[in-house]
Each structure stands twice: as structure tokens, then as C-alpha cells.
Amino acid sequence: MPKFKIPYSTTFVELDIPEENFAGVLESKAHHYVPKFSETEIVEKALDNPIGSPSLEELVKGKKNMVIITSDHTRPVPSKITLPILLRRIRNANPDIDVTILIATGFHRATTHDEMIRKFGEEIVKNEKMVNHVCWDKDNMAYVGILPSGGELWLNKLAVETELLISEGFIEPHFFAGFSGGRKSILPGIAGEKTVLANHCSKFIASPFARTGILENNPIHKDMVYAAEKVGLAFILNVVIDAQKKIIHAVAGHPQKAHEEGCQFVKDLAVVEKVPADIVITSNGGYPLDQNIYQTVKGMTAAEASCKEGGVIIILSACNDGHGGESFYQYMANASSPKEVTEKVLQIPQDETIPDQWEFQILARILEKHTVFIVTDQCDKKMIENMHINHAYTIEEALEKAFQIKGKDASITVIPDGVSVIVK
């Protein structure tokens, strides 16, 4: 009987699949990739060999101030490793430079003090100047221009006005931007509300190019690259991580060239051939990406790509932080069906995009074709069901209900970490 360990919160849930039902498993090779060097050595080597760019040390020389953009509490960027290295190298080259660390919250809530300590370490939180980006704070936004899509580009003033702007992040498959990392630190990372909404409009989300692993012709990516160039993002450090959130690869240098090289590395590991099945079991990769229903939609898209129409998707996701977005929740909960959500959202013009629209648009698309179960013992059952999603406390309970829907001979595909694969 095939056995699997599925990420859930900060731990794993063990799963046994009956041999007669098992169709296949889809896993990124990143989870079995064994790097030749330690995490610290990988980062140092990337910074020693910048791609298409002068070194970080050269860039900071002569500068009075700089901003480092970093990821928020919803992203598993190993900043306890990367930030100390960046700060040491920066200050070795320019001891007097004034450094501000800007947390790219995008459209999320602010990262709390406790979350900062957990993510960055007490030393950095205590001694560094750290600022949460707040996309709704218009007084701290600067108008930079017009995006290729026609939307207005508003970015955090700290980033616009600094002498040197760099960012750190991680690269993984992304369900509508193609890949995370690179330019995403700018848009949506430190963009104003109006800009994020324009970039995430229903027309772009519906594009066949706005999918996992696709950058070419992706309208969302095109806007993001423009934003990064316009604000003068000078240098990036992006890492690739495995299932244990350990660094297995890093790229540094030119925001677009280094990012593209990192994306190719991820693509080589993450592309898997779909194994169509009646039931697909997956996860959102555990903490921190499975903190809410909003983020959980990402893992669902991998299952969607391998689930037969009318099939069942089971996703393990703690969702201990609730729905993750009031607009996201209300739009789903107040609709009579997912189809109603889809019909309404496609009528919304780009300049009238509403908060969280992209997330409920994708969720509705999935729910129209599949029955979805979220497995969690850390989230309000009623909240989940109000959003037209089924709830189960355990994987066994969800699987039993799935068999009731699809029959005892239903085929099952397992995707242990739904956010780590590109299903073709």
C-alpha cells in the first residue's frame, strides 16, 4: 500500500492509499535534490557570482541610503540565513550606509512583531529599521507611471526615493504569475492598492498564459517586470527551497536575468506530467503557506490540473488564520454558487477590480468543475462551508466522502506539495 507524508501546518500527516486505487504521485525533484554545499555557502556563492550585474559590494559603494525589500509572514523565505549575509556584505563595503528593510506585504495584512521575530530573528528585528508596506496607505505611495496594461503604477515612497533598491525572495511556481520571486517584490510586494487591483484584473486572471510556470505572454508578469524596471530595482537575491524549507539553490544579480535563470532551475525540477484521476490529494506545502483559505487556492490549482472533470480535490491546509481576506470570503459566501461568482467577476472592468477578486475568481473556476474538501482541525468548519467548499477534520474522513461521491474504485493521484509542482 503506497504511503505518503503530506505537509500540514508545521508537521506532516501520514497517508495510506489502497493499491487498487493508486494512479500516481506528482512530486517536484526539488524535494529530493541534494546540494553540494551548505545553505550559507550556496547564498555566498550566488552573491560572489552575480548574474548580469555588478556585485552587491560595488553597488553600495558611495551610497548614503538603501532599501532591502523582503517577504512577509506568508512566504517561507529563509531570511534568518539570507538577511544577515546581505547586511554583513553591505556594511563591509559601506559601514555608514543607512539601511531600511521594507516588508513586502503586497495586499496582505501587516506582519506582526512576533511574526517578524519568527521569520527574521530577534537580532535583526531589534537592531534594524524595519517597515511594513501598507498598500492602502496612499500618503506613503508615489506615482511612478502607467503600466503596460494601462493601470496606474503607485509604489512605496521608501523604494522610490532611496538611492539603492535591492530585494530578497524565493522562487517557486506561482499559479498566475508563472513564478514567484524577482519582480514580484515590487508588484504586488510594495505596490499601492490601485496598482495591485489593476494588475490582478479578471481579464488577466482568465488569460491562458496567466498560469503556473508560464512567463512568456503572461500579462501579469509583463506589468510586474515593467514596475521593477521603472522603480530601479538594482539587484536581487533569490533562493530555491525544498520541502523542509532548506535552501538548495540561489541566484543573485540583475533583477530579470538572475530571476529568469532561477526560474529555469525551478522549472527543470518542478515540471511533472499529469496523471488524471477521479480524486486528487494535495497540500499547500504546510506552514507558512497554509495559514488561510486565500493562500490555499494555490495548492488547489495543481490538483485542478490533474483532476478529471467532476472529480474530487482533497487539500490538507491548516487555515488557522481563517479565510485570509474579507472581500474574498464575502464574495464567495454571498453567492448562490461558484458559477454566479465567475459570471459576475468577468463583468468587472480592470479599473473597477475589487480586493481579492483574483483569488475568488480562481477558486470559483475550480469549484465549478470539482468538489473540493479542505482537511483541517484548526479552522471554523462553517466558514469553509459558507464558501462552497467541503470540510473534513481528517484525511480519512475526506477520502471516505470522496469514495462516496466517485465510487470505491475511484483512481487517486497524490501531489504531496501542491505549490511546488508545475503540472503539464
Image (cartoon, rainbow, N blue to C red):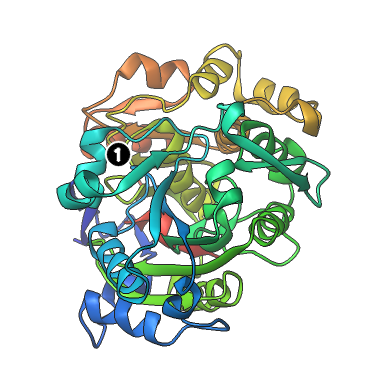
Q: Residue 317 appears in which quarter of the rendering?
A: top left
Residue 60 position, x and y percent, is 46, 71
The residue drawn where x is 76% and y is 30% is: 346
Which image quarter is the C terminus in? bottom right
Residue 386 appearing in the image: yes
The residue drawn where x is 43% and y is 39% is: 295
Which image quarter is the N terminus in? bottom left
The residue drawn where x is 58% and y is 59% is: 183
Residue 412 appearing in the image: no
Query: What amino acid is labelled 1 in the image?
Result: Leu
| Placement of 190 over or under 355, stated as above or below | below
Total marks shown come to 1
Q: Is residue 85 left or right of residue 180?
A: left
Quickly name the residue at label 1. 399
Residue 20 position, x and y percent, is 30, 58
Label 1 crowd bin: few (<14), some (14–19), many (20+), radius 10 Å:
many
Q: Is residue 205 left or right of residue 392?
A: right
